[in-house]
Image (cartoon, coloured by chain):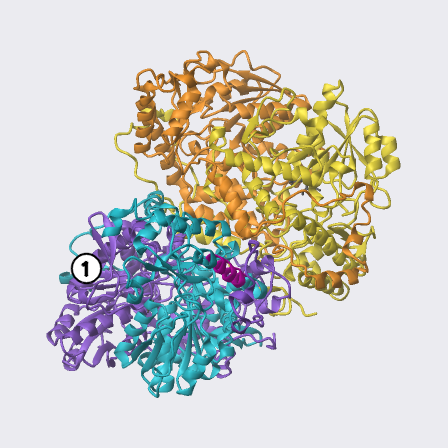
Chain colours: A orange, B cyan, C yellow, D purple
Amino acid sequence: MRFIPHTEADVAAMLAVIGAPDVESLFASIPASVRLGRELNLPQGFSEAETLSHLGALAKNNAHSASHSFFLGAGVYSHYIPSVVNHLASKPEFSTSYTPYQAEISQGTLQAIYEYQTLLCQLTGMDVANASLYEGASATAEACLMAMRLTGRHRVVMAKGLHPEYRQVVDTYLRHTGGETMEVGWDEDGRVEDLSGALNEETAALLVQSPNFFGVVEDLAPLVQAAHDKGALFVHVVTEGISLGLLKASGDLGADIVAGEGQSFGIPMSFGGPFLGLFATREAYVRQMPGRLVGQTVDTEGRRGYVLTAATREQHIRRAKATSNICTNEGLCALRAAVYLSALGRQGLRELAVQNALGAERAKKLIQELPGFEIPFSAPTFNEFVVKVPFPAAEVTARLRQAGILGGLDLGRWYPEFQKDPGTSHLLFCVTEENPPEAVDVLVGALRGLKSLREPAAEGSTR
Amino acid sequence: MRFIPHTEADVAAMLAVIGAPDVESLFASIPASVRLGRELNLPQGFSEAETLSHLGALAKNNAHSASHSFFLGAGVYSHYIPSVVNHLASKPEFSTSYTPYQAEISQGTLQAIYEYQTLLCQLTGMDVANASLYEGASATAEACLMAMRLTGRHRVVMAKGLHPEYRQVVDTYLRHTGGETMEVGWDEDGRVEDLSGALNEETAALLVQSPNFFGVVEDLAPLVQAAHDKGALFVHVVTEGISLGLLKASGDLGADIVAGEGQSFGIPMSFGGPFLGLFATREAYVRQMPGRLVGQTVDTEGRRGYVLTAATREQHIRRAKATSNICTNEGLCALRAAVYLSALGRQGLRELAVQNALGAERAKKLIQELPGFEIPFSAPTFNEFVVKVPFPAAEVTARLRQAGILGGLDLGRWYPEFQKDPGTSHLLFCVTEENPPEAVDVLVGALRGLKSLREPAAEGSTR
Amino acid sequence: MKDPASPARGRPDRVGASGLILNEPLIFERSSPGRQAYSLSSSPDGLAELSEVLPPTLCREEIPGFPEVSEVDLVRHYTRLAGWNYSVDHGFYPLGSCTMKYNPKVNEDVAAMAGFARLHPYQEEEACQGALALLWELDLALREITGMDRMVLQPTAGAQGELTGMMLIRAHLTDQGNPRRKVLLPDSAHGTNPASSTLCGYEVVEIKSDERGLMNLRALETTMDDETAALMLTNPNTLGLFEEDIKAICQIVHDRGGFVYCDGANMNALMGIARMGDMGMDVVQLNLHKTFSTPHGGGGPGAGPVGVKKILEPYLPVPVIEKRGERYHFNYDIPHSIGKVRSFYGNFGILVRAYSYICSMGRDGLKRASQMAVLNANYLCARLKGRYYLTYDRTCMHECVLSDKHQQAHGVRTSDIAKRLMDYGFHPPTIYFPLIVKGAMMIEPTETESRETLDEFIEAMLAIADEAERAPGLIQSAPHFPKTSRLDEVKAAREPVLRWQEDSPP
Amino acid sequence: MKDPASPARGRPDRVGASGLILNEPLIFERSSPGRQAYSLSSSPDGLAELSEVLPPTLCREEIPGFPEVSEVDLVRHYTRLAGWNYSVDHGFYPLGSCTMKYNPKVNEDVAAMAGFARLHPYQEEEACQGALALLWELDLALREITGMDRMVLQPTAGAQGELTGMMLIRAHLTDQGNPRRKVLLPDSAHGTNPASSTLCGYEVVEIKSDERGLMNLRALETTMDDETAALMLTNPNTLGLFEEDIKAICQIVHDRGGFVYCDGANMNALMGIARMGDMGMDVVQLNLHKTFSTPHGGGGPGAGPVGVKKILEPYLPVPVIEKRGERYHFNYDIPHSIGKVRSFYGNFGILVRAYSYICSMGRDGLKRASQMAVLNANYLCARLKGRYYLTYDRTCMHECVLSDKHQQAHGVRTSDIAKRLMDYGFHPPTIYFPLIVKGAMMIEPTETESRETLDEFIEAMLAIADEAERAPGLIQSAPHFPKTSRLDEVKAAREPVLRWQEDSPP
Ligand SMILES: Cc1ncc(COP(=O)(O)O)c(C=O)c1O
Ligand SMILES: Cc1ncc(COP(=O)(O)O)c(C=O)c1O
């Protein structure tokens, strides 16, 4: 076995030192009644070549963003990952080390995470960012719990433009500790509707995603004001991190917490994970923050160095009273994000964001011009937009797939509002720098071609 | 430009220090008459994504050993490369450093090459191996030049079972310094024919490849004897390094030089390079050896360390009188080979070699049973063998390609002997551990199916 | 023993040595306006003006402080940083409870395949059958290894697995009319256990371990009541000891309508030997980044799949992977589901690596791994317990817990020994955990370590024990070789500096 | 300046520091019988016995001394070894004549694509059109950059390019009736130039450079005769100076029926600025591992394509890449071909990287690279020449050559300065070459280095100049930080130990 070095001679010599007759005897403390009296019912080990061909066959049985023209978004984005990001983040010195509890031999990880924290602060305009949470949805739930602790209140108001899975996770997380959630809908233009009725003295936090699940950029300033007016915290949820390069910084708008997903920062889509839970807040709230923090300090000779700090918030010190139960986080994804953001840098991230916005706008305009197609929301969008399509969703996406296109996404899956007319559907399309104009033109052509859908695919449309 | 850090401010500040008015002025020593008075006629730089998609499109326009069932060999072999080999050999600490002239900060490269030299000695049974030459053919030519220096003779005898390109390279290299080559054919069984007439007092070296170009394992001992009887050196040429794991060590058979190709040792086929020129010899001949050598020494505190040594043979010291003009060699390929050979190790390399031999033998037997097909050579083979096919080569390979199979190789390209009957051809097939029995069975089935070739492909067969 | 702080930079007879490394400032301090490490494909013509798309009031002008570096700056920055880390690829990393085994390289290749890495979670099922098949097969394999009836692969890490498991228990109890109030834990429990319980709305009651270091049956008997939802137990426990009375323990808890939750972080001791399901435990989370060799990433990502008995199946988070004929399918229609604990389906990239590992190891390999892990731990323990105090002197499983009791007389503490190990070229063990052993050093060697490596480590530990007697100052001032000497954690906590600022001193 | 050998391990104000590294024996010393790092797919049933295939007389029993290690052993072995190397990814690597520029990562990704890496050279042309297209496009681009009429991509490295070029000249002259006897070289020539000439059957005649450091026109006039086949010239030459009289030089050689061979190793100074073809030179080799950024691999692989004028085309080695309509094709039918200098078509994997680099850089990028390379060299030279002796004080191109003349008074030599630079965290320059400068330090910064990096290096050089005056012993005993102190090269040469033996002392 190539991962286990023991030869039979080693085993014998070691047993002799231990004074045990055989390996079996080392397991004597396990009562026979709970022993597995047989071998595991699993295949024998594969050779490396066999493993690769077995897994390779599974991989080949998936369409993906390189095999198809790709227009899916909705919280997971197909962005170009610069080669350096893969090369640097996959260095085994980073990937095969543990959480940097032993600072003196973990300065590489610690400095990288310190830089990540700084980058996230700069990007969000917040004072302090943690070393990562699991992913966007649970990070959002942690933001709610933190707001509840800070305000002593128990209700959280969520815009329905918040990613449906995020809302579901918030529900799941809050339910057991007395939290309550309430949802507010959207206006005609795709932005959150009037909140006046929803916020009150019981509101711990208002959660608004922007750009929201429909791709629409919210006007956050008045929403922050409305929350603060009721003594609630405002949580800005971000699922498309690239937007931070172009849109006003949450901190400058008065947000109290920024929570969300950092997948766009150089992390592959990987069928939904591992991702990167973003979390940043104001300095005053540090002690209630969940997750690990890296801080600067000095060694005995006064040289700058970095350590994990403020651990008294954490489970391994505070146990039942910790601010969160998180232990293993997404360190390597945070490091990836740090490399990515440093590679793009001050100019690049903005240019990239602009390119996304303009490319998506072009696609939106072209689709809007197609007869029978509508863009239901008039508010500005970033790199995603909703299209009202005069056909059932499943038929559209099946036809697009035949044309080598993946997307858009049927919103009816989460929003009954969008399912009223079975003959039409609402699809979400995402356009990033990975979709050159020619590919968008092919998409538009394919959508245009759908008018012939009724005839050849009549069968499918009756189900 | 992402690879050039200079901002305009940098340029201005640096020019000020230099005291030059502009960058242009730094080129004042280049006369106008030889200046390129225009821009280069090349496209503007691509973004990284564009580069990848341009090169990716070129790569997709090639069949390869993962897209097809693969039976080509003939000096370049499709072997499984363990994942660790790629991971370790691509470490930038190894790949982005120069030749280790500054030993104290190059101990990683130096120790790895020292280990490579040792591994090659163990494998060949020779006393000393160099740090690599370019590839098999020029390494063979260097062996001839060395033999000429050692013997003071000028003629080299090559078996025609030596790779045709190697023979061509030997010719090219020797011609200018008074060297002469002469070729001897093969016997019915595929081994080198009687040499008695070929060797004489002018013979500097006898070159025999084993396994030879037809996959046949030569009986080296009497050949060594024949060479030594005339005072000539015996050069064992190896193109399939894996055979060394199973076949008698060249050194034990009395060979004076082993030269050849190390591509099989974890190096990708890459359309023919970069590869690894193997070169090993007897201790007595070290001073006439071409190429770099790493030797062991100590530092000022007596600790073991490694340095480049015996440099007085080399061009940078000996200049016009050097044993070779080689400077840049194939260091990283040698390191790859060291990782590969260490991964396979004492047991693994032998097991692998046995698997190759048995798998190829099975294929040979199955093909031999096909009506109309012949195995012309009766001597034992390693992992390649010649098949006499009752159809023209181009038609066979085209049909096989249609069936998703690449190979065999038309030997008529190099040997008029095999082109006598236009209706038949001699093809070389290679079977390695990468060809599971099922794939071999498909090949055999496809060959069997060729009997229908005349009819549908009648057109092609008339040209 | 010679002082390793002396200029014996490369003494070949020991692992740790001193050599050239390179300093490197923060990336922000490397920044220079106008440098770039990126390239964007040129924008198409005929686009709208930005202001037509997004009104300037919504947009920012710039990102103050964001770095601007060239590609070579960036590469060197991270290359130098990497040189300051100790990792499994460097050497022995015996962090107890963390199972820092070797992470096979091939698993990285597999996870990077375009068909996995470039797969979007909202592709229709027809377009991702390979990924679904993988999830299904992994589910089956983990069921077989744990003896549970069903797995859920969604939880992101061990702690989220715990939370998920506790939510399932709570959901069932709630369905039955009373979620109950309390959760019992041994005092040796990992910090995530109480934290997860709290997050699930339970009050934590700690049970003092008995003199064997095991669950005190009597105490459990008296504490377990019908307001107690569950007992959370780690087995083998954090002392590396198997809970021998596990059947009786489960009986007590079940008799009073409670559930037994197994923290399966220590599964590496038991593969192919004993299964949580067979022990009577109802829920277990596995830490794939431990037992199943996925790289720990300097803090993550990991994955914490949860296995449950049939009774808890109705509550599983959505979606649940199913196989119907030859087709794989996500079932979202679980009426009693607790909902979701995170987006999508879990840390798929980690699940891929773990599945690849299981394929490579196979039936015999997994069992052999557990056997050799236990052999290694007992070997270490046998050779060290003469010089380092062993509180619970019993045959251990995959790890053993020593302490600094003997060394304290010389003023040398566990944290000093840990730092001193660095000079010898080793990562220290987990220290000061479990809390029930004063000055604990929790050593988990894992099966991927050879006898030679263990011997090198043992020699270092014995040399340090000697030094503690002869030259304690050398240990108290350790480490001497790494980039920095001992870092001031107190200062970091008292005067928090949690980000670089434009005007930060270098 | 504080002594860097003092325990100021990580002084943040300098690049070089001392930190933890790990010792590691030879892989053979790690070996233990029965360990394995490999896995073979199980052999199919129904195979012959080995002895039926290959008689035992042809086979060996075992490979004495071959190592047996586990995968983790192997990974740690090379991880530790890697930690002892200094590389471009670590920092400044100003080896003169070597053009150690940054090697873009993306080129590695490209070369690893299955369609390139898994391509066999004997696939039929229909099955490798993409590869042929790439060779063709690279050929075109290099023609444009050098101003030559045709390229041959076959040569494996610069030296083999030289040999190939000389063979072409010899073939032509032979065709004309007399191959001639001699080749002229300046005394500043790189060692491969005379070695290649000899290998091509020529006698080498060295011409002393003039007081400018350039080709001595007068000497050339008197030496060039009709038994001289060629002049080999490096331009810019190895002093980093442009051969201003290049047109006159070519004239003299051509007038007497000779050829001018250009060693193009220094192309990095000239891209988009001047071309060998336009200068009148007849043959040039390019070192793609220098100018075109392919990683040097600790000694190779590289690639040394050769560009020629029309007159030499009939002699090119086979095959020659051609484009017919939309199809690419290898032409083997070159009746006057010199044959082949190596198997197949050259170091294709390196050619792929170089082509990828040219695509990324583009027209303006290549020119900018040369401009900034020259700017960097002149900046370094301007700031250092006050403290280090500059023999030829002229505007240099991409590199400059200083010497230890000022330091020798203090007993400090170039080799000492080189070793001392290591302590400061830099790779030393090329030393003792070119031979015409005593104690030469040949510094080539390349364009990928920032002003800040140059400044750090300059400060180190100036600090060393101070040390030479104040504390020469510190330099003479350098290096102090790397894994080993100065290694005994004399012992290595006198008592050669070129391989490990079973009974070697550790
Ligand atoms: C015993 C035990 N339980 C639970 C955990 C938590 O697992 P994770 O870090 O994956 O959240 C750990 C991890 O350190 C552990 O050691
Ligand atoms: C000026 C000069 N010419 C020729 C060469 C030889 O090139 P290569 O090492 O690629 O064979 C070198 C390489 O160092 C060089 O610097």
Q: Who's the residue at 70% across and 39% down the image? A: C146
Q: In this image, D397 relative to A289: left or right?
A: left
Residue B431, image x, y percentages? 45, 57
Q: How many marks can you see?
A: 1
Q: Is residue C31 above or below residue D120?
A: above
Q: Which residue bears the numbered disc 1?
A: D147
Q: Which stretch did the figure color magenta?
A: B352-363
- Picture quadrant where residue A382 is located: top left
Q: Secondary structure at mark 1?
A: loop
Q: In this image, A299 relative to D110: left or right?
A: right
Front-lying residue, B279 or D473:
B279
Three-letter amino acid code of the residue under disc 1: Gly
Q: Is residue A236 above or below residue B10?
A: above
Is residue C297 one of those drawn in magenta?
Answer: no
Residue A230, image x, y percentages? 57, 17
Q: Is residue A341 above or below residue D110?
A: above
Residue C116, image x, y percentages? 49, 39
Q: Chain of mark 1?
A: D
Q: Is residue C70 visible?
A: no
By secondary structure, the bulk of the magenta-drawn segment is best described as helix
Q: Is residue B451 above or below residue C409?
A: above
Is residue B360 one of those drawn in magenta?
Answer: yes
Q: Is residue B93 visible?
A: yes
